[in-house]
Image (cartoon, coloured by chain):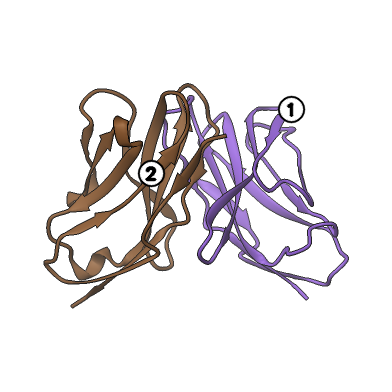
Amino acid sequence: DGGITQSPKYLFRKEGQNVTLSCEQNLNHDAMYWYRQDPGQGLRLIYYSQIVNDFQKGDIAEGYSVSREKKESFPLTVTSAQKNPTAFYLCASTTGTGAYEQYFGPGTRLTVT
Amino acid sequence: AQSVSQHNHHVILSEAASLELGCNYSYGGTVNLFWYVQYPGQHLQLLLKYFSGDPLVKGIKGFEAEFIKSKFSFNLRKPSVQWSDTAEYFCAVTPLNNNDMRFGAGTRLTVKP
């Protein structure tokens, strides 16, 4: 079964701790993305990567970091510098450039207290 | 970077009513345009997309959208909604030949049986 997996589904952390969200795809897609979804604000782009070992900041990259060491994997680290980390995080991937649809994972809901 | 505006935050309709959801984008060049849908508890999925040719595009489940270049708009329409269309709808845009996708804030559609 091809698709995108994100784990865990729910994640709880204490303020001040870094946390890494997992995203894996077996679709052989080149590009991968991280979005944050908040009520009334839609999906806001955090980072995206078009190829291995390369990534670009999106609109809200501050307080987040990513790596792309393998084509299949694009983990997102939410650092203690992110002021409002509690949110729903979505990972997506796509093949080709521009006109190709993105495929989304099920998301991870992060709660920081 | 490009941006997307969706004018309606929450739309409530009765079954069989017609639907039109507004989407406007801001970008100086050629774009690809998308509508995604997120049914309750499900992944985001593609409804339809426009990248060239006929500005009236048809998607799944009877949805269609019209690209009006002069108005920078890509409104989503359906002649007769069903209760099962209750979902959140997102408009998105990428520049031509670029994977940098940006989403609107979303419109929540509630269809009353």
Using the image as rendered, state which of residue A83 and residue A73 is in the foreground: A83
Which three-letter amino acid code belongs to the residue tagged 2?
Answer: Asn
The image quarter in which residue A49 lies: top right
Q: Is residue A10 left or right of residue A65?
A: left
Q: Secondary structure at mark 1?
A: loop
Which residue in the protein does label 2 denote?
A: B24
- Residue A17 location in percent, x, y? 86, 64
Measure the alpha-carbon separation of dots 1 and 2: 34 Å
Residue at 23 percent across and 31 percent down: it is B55
Which residue in the protein does label 1 denote?
A: A53
Query: Which residue occupies the extreme right position in the image?
Result: A16
Q: Is residue B41 left or right of residue A79?
A: left
**Chain A is shown in which shade?**
purple
Q: Residues within 10 Å of mark 1 (few under 14, many from 20)?
A: few
- Residue B109 location in percent, x, y? 32, 66
Residue at 54 percent across and 44 percent down: it is A92
Which three-letter amino acid code belongs to the residue tagged 1?
Answer: Asn
Q: Is residue B39 left or right of residue A2?
A: left
**Chain B is shown in which shade?**
brown
Q: Quadrant of the C terminus of chain B?
A: bottom left
Chain that bears disc 2: B
Q: Secondary structure at mark 2?
A: strand
